[in-house]
Image (spheres, rainbow, N blue to C red):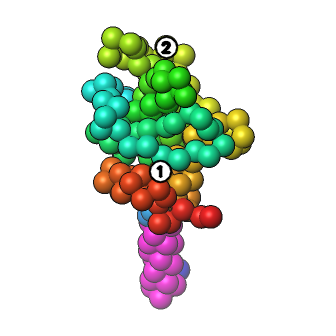
């Protein structure tokens, strides 16, 4: 074998090795993007202080009248897991209250009931808490209004509790579609 041919073979082998190293690096690069598709991991929900109805902000749910709905502004939290958590208060026309600590996951349009309020002013964790699809507006209107008008307007999650509070005060989030 001539020296020229030997040099050419070495050059080709070197090129193949560098291309395979490049391809191997490319595969690693691609796998970096695949890591973004990790399964969703929910954060452990911390129960807030029990809500004070006097401080709660009302939101209108016309199809649920005469029941009135309120959110405790101090309980609003936007988790790194993409869940907006809040204390919900429902007051019937007779004055009886139903208090719950809940979360809405904007990405999947699901809700979860973490805890029930007790008359003594504390929480009882929901042992059977699970994510459930938010049903149509006729069956579960308060969650639809929260999802679309206040917490996930325009299919996007709110950035801060202050943003939710502002939307509750004005009656609708500026990005809400109507």
Nearer to the camera, 173 or 54: 54
Q: Which residue is drawn at 56% across and 58% down?
A: 155
Q: How crowded is mark 1: few (under 14 residues within 10 Å), some or many (20 or more)?
A: many
Q: Is residue 140 visible?
A: yes
Nearer to the camera, 24 or 86: 86
User: Looking at the image, which residue sits at the far bottom?
Assistant: 4
Q: Main secondary structure of the magenta part?
A: helix
Q: Position of residue 101 (x, y in %)?
A: 42, 28
For the residues labelled 1 and 2, the Cα–Cα distance comes to 25 Å
Q: Where is residue 80 in the image (x, y as percent from the top left)?
A: 36, 45
Residue 17 is one of the magenta-drawn residues: yes
**Quadrant the C terminus occupies:** bottom right
Residue 86 is one of the magenta-drawn residues: no
Q: Dot 2 lies on which element?
A: loop
Question: Mark 1 or 2 closer to N-term?
Answer: 2
Quarter where residue 119 is shown:
top left
Mark 1 and mark 2 residues within 8 Å of each other at the beta carbon? no
Q: Residue at x 53, y 54 (%)?
A: 149
Q: Which mark is residue 117?
A: none
Q: Badge 1 is on which residue?
A: 151
Q: Is residue 38 visible?
A: no
Q: In this view, does 96 lie to the left or right of 78?
A: right
Q: From the viewer's perspective, is the residue at label 1 or at label 2 nearer?
A: 1
Q: Position of residue 97 (x, y in %)?
A: 46, 23
Q: Position of residue 15 (x, y in %)?
A: 47, 77
Q: In this view, does 112 lie to the left or right of 58?
A: right
Q: Residue at x 32, y 29 (%)?
A: 51
Give the magenta range.
2-23
Q: Badge 2 is on which residue?
A: 127
């Amino acid at each position: 074998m001539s020296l020229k041919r030997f040099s050419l073979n070495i050059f080709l082998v070197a090129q193949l090795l560098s291309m395979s190293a490049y391809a191997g690096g490319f595969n690693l690069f691609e796998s970096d993007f695949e890591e973004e598709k990790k399964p969703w991991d929910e954060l452990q929900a911390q129960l807030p202080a029990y809500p004070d109805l006097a401080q709660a902000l009302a939101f209108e749910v016309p199809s649920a009248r005469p029941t009135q709905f309120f959110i405790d502004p101090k309980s609003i939290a936007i988790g790194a897991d993409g869940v907006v958590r809040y204390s919900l208060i429902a007051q019937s026309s007779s004055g009886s209250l139903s208090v719950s600590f809940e979360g809405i996951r904007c990405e999947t349009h699901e809700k979860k009931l973490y805890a029930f309020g007790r008359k003594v002013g504390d929480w009882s964790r929901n042992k059977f808490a699970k994510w459930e699809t938010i049903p149509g507006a006729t069956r579960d209107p308060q969650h639809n209004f929260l999802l679309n008008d206040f917490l996930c307007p325009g299919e996007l999650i709110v950035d801060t509790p202050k943003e939710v509070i502002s939307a509750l005060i004005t009656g609708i989030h500026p990005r809400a579609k109507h």
